[in-house]
């Protein structure tokens, strides 16, 4: 939470006024109303607020006189912040919140959405759904596997509820994917103002998109602040989970420092991501290459690439970041492309302006309102872009709907502006499928520029083999290289790295085989008290960020455990018929999604049989509401 106190001194009056004039007027107005509780200026200014569509999205605009009035009010309020110290700026009443939230983008906000939006923006946190009349019984323990974003969120929530927990992490440090990936240019491609925990909104991001090291620091700060760090056992790899019906506990088989151990826990939250095992292309001769070659997730920090002829295999998000970061250092860069991606233009300057940084850190509620403005734009507002419109698709070669065409035109515009003088590259880099058919990519700022350099080559014919001297493409041309970086992603894994044996002795691998399905994306019949984060059909692939799904599932897991505490039962398990109903809902919703309809795109969202097993086909708000508490008709309590 926050309070009405600035962290840093006010700048000189003329500087502060300039910053307030330059601020997003809807966000600033909402912040000032939150600080003061006064609505008179809001009532006067809201009717004058206009919204303009631009390259970076929707921009609220006030006439100059109204903007001056808002700045004057801001100067007055910020000069006397201590006078509002007794008021919680995040506790604005519903009517004002609705009006101000609707003004952020010029879209009406429904009253039913208030709890959802308040949480996503960071105005509320740890809001219970069920009564809290009983606490966890003596000796009850929760095991959390993984200390990345999901594991940290689960541990924070458990500690908040007074549930004893232990986090098992195989790596020597926390962070999950951000610990594993250390390649040059590594960063988050979800905007920084949203890509954080809702219970710990970070006003100190310096860039529009956080760098990998900066995000790792954020996760570590959260873990320290909420007492999670001392609950993590690093260097501890889980190998097996076995449910014991008699004791209603999980036996957890671990390996630590070369020794096997067994632990026990009443419940388990798996917080392992589904993209952790590096995947290499199926091309002969990889081991014959004479120079250094490695996967981007296993970056060789001892390998100096400066002045070398570098080959980068793959054109996904990781490849884009590596190319952007390395091109100035290497003698030449050869990019091997299997299928082009839609690459969206950079979203303004990478570093936030000083005025924005000061406002985010020092104006109470400003970070929350700014986060909400961004979230409204990147969440369910994007949902129509992944839904198939047969009438539109019948007359358009690539896009599947009018909204999908908006992204198509942005991507095409970036391509055509970048390669107007290079028709050869324009042809190679233009995708032949609808946007969102595979995960869209953001240009970090210099990716397309890097590919136009005289020392850069784009190979789109495919790979024939790797030889000691380099890579031979499908046309038989040898590309001589000094080093090869495989930016070829990961194998899509849903807990296949562990043996997980359920109540009837069957393993999760046997139940799932190649088609994993989990009720609400997190529960499986036959596996009591096992909660899966990063599960199948739980990734909001049309918008938002991984943090959204993580928090929704963690909340649901905690509410399931609270159900046990309140009723005196020992285990909760989803019923097979509820699982089947969920499966049918997922299948029906996916049928008219871009991931099913757009078969021209190769994507890790699908399994070997072509089934979409990753993306959630639901609106984020609907999924959030579904996970508020367990439906007792869908679960068995024992």
Image (cartoon, grey):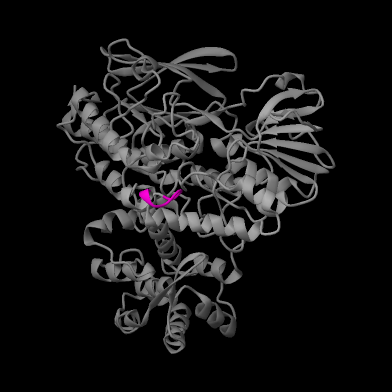
Query: Residue 454, relative to residue 568: is it above or below?
Result: below
Q: Residue at 57%, 44% (x, y): give it.
A: 216
Left or right of 563 in this view: 189 = right
- Prevailing secondary structure class for the magenta stretch in the rendered image: loop
| Left or right of 245 on screen, residue 26 | right
Q: Estimate the x, y position of residue 259 in percent, counting from the top left.
A: 56, 12
* Point 47% across, 31% down: residue: 274
Q: Give the range drawn in magenta.
A: 394-399
Q: Nearer the viewer, residue 428 or 197?
A: 428
**Is 283 displayed left or right of 378 in the figure?**
right
Task: Please tell me whether residue 187 belongs to the stretch shown in magenta.
Answer: no
> Residue reaching furthest left?
633
Residue at the extreme top: 505
On the image, the x and y values in percent for residue 10 come to 55, 76
What residue do we see at 61% from left, 23% from top? 282
Is 263 or 379 nearer to us in this picture? 379
Left/right placement of residue 144 relative to residue 524 reads right
Give the image location of residue 92, x and y in percent.
Answer: 30, 67
Picture quadrant where residue 136 is located: top left
For the question of whether residue 71 can be seen, the reply is yes
Image position of 111 with respect to 573: above or below? below
Task: Tell me what residue is drawn at x 56 percent, y 44 percent.
Answer: 341
Q: Which picture quadrant has residue 293?
A: top right
How far from the left and from the top, in percent, is residue 232?
Answer: 50, 31
């Amino acid at each position: 939470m926050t309070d009405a106190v600035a962290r840093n001194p006010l700048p000189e009056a003329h500087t502060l006024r300039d910053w307030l004039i330059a601020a997003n007027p809807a966000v600033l107005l909402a912040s000032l109303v939150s600080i003061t509780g006064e609505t008179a200026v809001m009532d006067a200014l809201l009717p004058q607020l206009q919204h303009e569509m631009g390259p970076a999205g929707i921009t609220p605009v006030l006439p100059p006189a109204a903007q001056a009035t808002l700045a004057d009010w801001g100067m007055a309020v910020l000069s006397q912040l201590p006078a509002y110290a007794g008021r919680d700026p995040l506790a604005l009443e519903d009517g004002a919140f609705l009006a101000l939230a609707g003004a952020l983008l010029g879209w009406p906000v429904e009253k039913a959405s208030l709890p959802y939006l308040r949480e996503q923006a960071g105005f509320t946190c740890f809001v219970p759904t069920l009564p809290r009349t009983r606490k966890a019984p003596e000796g009850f323990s929760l095991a959390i596997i993984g200390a990345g974003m999901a594991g940290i969120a689960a541990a924070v929530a458990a500690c908040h509820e007074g549930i004893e927990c232990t986090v098992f992490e195989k790596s020597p440090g926390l962070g999950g994917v951000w610990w594993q990936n250390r390649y040059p240019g590594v960063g988050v491609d979800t905007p920084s103002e949203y890509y954080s925990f809702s219970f710990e909104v970070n006003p100190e991001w310096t860039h529009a998109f956080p760098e990998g090291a900066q995000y790792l620091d954020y996760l570590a700060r959260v873990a320290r602040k909420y007492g999670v760090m001392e609950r993590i056992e690093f260097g501890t790899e889980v190998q097996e989970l076995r449910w014991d019906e008699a004791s209603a506990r999980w036996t957890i088989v671990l390996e630590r420092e070369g020794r096997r151990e067994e632990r026990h826990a009443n419940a388990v939250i798996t917080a392992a991501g589904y993209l952790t095992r590096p995947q290499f292309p199926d091309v002969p001769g990889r081991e014959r290459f004479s120079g250094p070659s490695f996967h981007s997730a296993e970056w060789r920090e001892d390998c100096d690439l400066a002045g070398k002829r570098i080959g980068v295999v793959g054109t996904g998000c990781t490849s884009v970041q590596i190319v952007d970061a390395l091109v100035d250092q290497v003698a030449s860069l050869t990019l091997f492309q299997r299928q082009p991606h839609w690459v969206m233009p950079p979203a303004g300057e990478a570093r936030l302006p000083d005025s924005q940084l000061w406002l985010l850190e020092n104006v109470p509620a400003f970070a929350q309102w700014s986060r909400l403005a961004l979230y409204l734009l990147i969440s369910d507002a994007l949902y129509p872009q992944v839904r198939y419109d047969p009438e539109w698709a019948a007359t358009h070669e690539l896009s599947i709907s009018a909204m999908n065409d908006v992204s198509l035109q942005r991507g095409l515009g970036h391509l055509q502006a970048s390669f107007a003088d290079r028709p050869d590259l324009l042809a190679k880099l233009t995708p032949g499928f609808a946007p969102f058919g595979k995960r869209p990519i953001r240009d970090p700022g210099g990716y397309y520029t890097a590919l136009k350099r005289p020392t850069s080559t784009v190979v789109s014919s495919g790979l024939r083999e790797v030889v000691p001297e380099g890579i031979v493409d499908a046309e038989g041309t040898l590309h001589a290289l000094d080093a090869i970086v495989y930016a070829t992603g990961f194998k899509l894994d849903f807990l296949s790295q562990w043996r997980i044996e359920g109540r009837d002795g069957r393993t999760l691998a046997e139940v799932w085989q190649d088609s994993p399905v989990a009720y609400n994306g997190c529960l499986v019949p036959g596996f009591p008290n096992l909660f899966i984060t990063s599960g199948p059909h739980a990734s909001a692939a049309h918008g938002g960020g991984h943090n959204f799904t993580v928090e929704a599932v963690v909340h649901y897991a905690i509410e399931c455990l609270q159900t046990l505490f309140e009723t005196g039962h020992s285990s909760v398990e989803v019923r097979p018929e509820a699982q089947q109903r969920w499966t049918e809902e997922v299948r029906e919703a996916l049928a008219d999604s871009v991931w099913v309809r757009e078969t021209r795109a190769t994507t890790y969202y699908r399994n070997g049989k072509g089934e979409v097993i990753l993306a959630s086909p639901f609106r984020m708000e609907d999924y959030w509401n579904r996970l508020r508490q367990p439906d007792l008709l869908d679960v068995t309590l024992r």
